[in-house]
Image (spheres, rainbow, N blue to C red):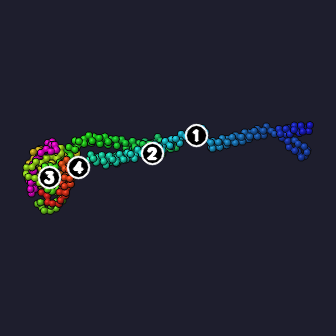
């Protein structure tokens, strides 16, 4: 009975608060105003809200939402794709550099064409900022750099493709070009005994001083036929009693010219077309000459070159070695 009554009192005290009054030596009920009750409720709500927000922030700080996880996966995937793309661009650039190297130092050398200037191959894009639209993002620099590399690679590929178009045209014109390049001896010289003096410093036959001899001398009887060494057009056919005497100059195109001097006579005229092997004149002793012979020169891109390197249609490897040996002897020239 007492236990039941005590339980009832305890339950009542948990709902209603009391305090002990020392003066009256009794418990008195704590009376709270509505304002106090409201403030307690408000404090409880505020505390609960703060704790809840803290827990939410802590959760989102430590744990990603499904959408954030998906976005992070997409970003990581894009970064991997970027790295792969950058590797592909780098590899493509290496291959393109090798093609450019072969183009400038092999193909264009074979066809005697000027290499493409590096400033053209590596030229950038002028004018407005092409990459301004990529600014303001988290990875703006990365995106701009990648697009810049792609643009540069695209332009280099375009330049190289145009170069290969030019090389293709050169290949198509190669057969015609080969017919124009000087490639035979200007006089019949099967046993090589007519090669009298080569290109280089020689003793002048009249002044007896060491002077540069810009061509090759072929000794032959007066009236020996002189042949055009490549297809071309007669640029000059001149009669003279001085210097080189009666002379012919042929423009072969492709930067080549040939010069034939000390002729007895010539049978061609200016602007006449000639083919390799055509008789254009005859050996003589005109001008400043000490004996019947032909003085022969080759000009490439306005520079005189050694003719001994341009007899590849006439000479075998052994004959070329012998001709090279004979032409390198520092003897006396005929003019």
Q: Which residue is mark 1?
A: 69
Q: From the image, state whether disc 2 or disc 1 is nearer to you.
A: 2
Could you give the CA–CA distance between mark 3 and mark 2, rounded to whole angstroms? 62 Å
Observer-nearest residue: 74 or 242? 74
The answer to whether marks 3 and 1 mark residues whose Cβ atoms lie closer than 8 Å is: no
Q: Where is residue 222? Give x, y as percent.
A: 7, 51
The residue tagged with tag 3: helix, strand or loop?
loop
The residue tagged with tag 2: helix, strand or loop?
helix
Q: Where is residue 124? Give x, y as percent.
A: 38, 45
Splitting the image into 4 quarters, where does residue 329 fall? bottom left
Q: Which residue is mark 2?
A: 87
Let me know if residue 273 appears in the view.
yes
The residue tagged with tag 1: helix, strand or loop?
helix
Observer-nearest residue: 186 or 297? 186
Q: From the image, state whether disc 2 or disc 4 is nearer to you.
A: 2
Q: Where is residue 231? Give x, y as percent.
A: 18, 44
Q: Residue at x 19, y 47 (%)?
A: 313
Lateral position of residue 132 relative to residue 49, left or right: left
Q: Which residue is mark 4?
A: 301
Residue 114's label in the rendered image is: none
The residue tagged with tag 4: helix, strand or loop?
loop
Q: Residue at x 81, y 39 (%)?
A: 32
> Mark 1 or mark 2, which is nearer the start of the sequence?
1
The answer to whether marks 2 and 1 mark residues whose Cβ atoms lie closer than 8 Å is: no
Assess disc 4: are there few (<14), some (14-19) or many (≥20) residues with their C-alpha within 10 Å of its C-alpha.
few
Assess disc 1: are there few (<14), some (14-19) or many (≥20) residues with their C-alpha within 10 Å of its C-alpha.
few
């Amino acid at each position: 009975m007492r236990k039941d009554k005590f339980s009832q009192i305890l339950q009542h005290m948990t709902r209603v608060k009391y305090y002990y009054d020392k003066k009256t030596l009794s418990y008195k009920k704590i009376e709270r105003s509505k304002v106090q009750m409201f403030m307690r409720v408000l404090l409880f709500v505020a505390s609960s809200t703060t704790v809840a927000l803290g827990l939410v922030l802590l959760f989102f700080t430590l744990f990603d939402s499904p959408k954030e996880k998906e976005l992070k996966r997409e970003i990581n995937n894009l970064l991997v794709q970027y790295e792969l793309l950058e590797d592909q661009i780098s590899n493509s650039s290496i291959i393109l550099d090798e093609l450019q190297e072969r183009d400038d130092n092999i193909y264009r050398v074979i066809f005697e064409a000027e290499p493409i200037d590096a400033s053209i191959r590596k030229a950038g894009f002028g004018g407005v900022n092409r990459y301004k639209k990529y600014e303001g993002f988290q990875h703006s620099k990365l995106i701009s750099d990648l697009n810049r590399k792609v643009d540069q690679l695209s332009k280099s590929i375009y330049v190289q493709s145009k170069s290969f178009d030019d090389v293709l045209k050169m290949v198509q014109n190669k057969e015609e070009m080969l017919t124009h390049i000087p490639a035979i001896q200007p006089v019949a010289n099967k046993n090589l005994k007519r090669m009298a003096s080569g290109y280089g410093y020689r003793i002048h036959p009249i002044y007896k001083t060491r002077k540069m001899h810009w061509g090759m001398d072929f000794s032959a009887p007066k009236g020996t036929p002189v042949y055009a060494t490549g297809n071309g057009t007669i640029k000059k056919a001149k009669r003279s009693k001085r210097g080189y005497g009666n002379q012919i100059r042929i423009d072969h195109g492709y930067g080549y010219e040939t010069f034939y001097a000390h002729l007895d006579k010539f049978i061609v005229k200016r602007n006449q077309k000639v083919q390799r092997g055509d008789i254009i004149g005859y050996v003589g002793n005109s001008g400043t000459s000490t004996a019947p012979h032909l003085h022969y020169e080759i000009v490439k891109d306005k520079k005189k070159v050694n003719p001994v390197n341009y007899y590849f249609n006439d000479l075998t490897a052994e004959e070329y070695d012998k001709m090279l040996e004979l032409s390198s002897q520092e003897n006396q020239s005929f003019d």
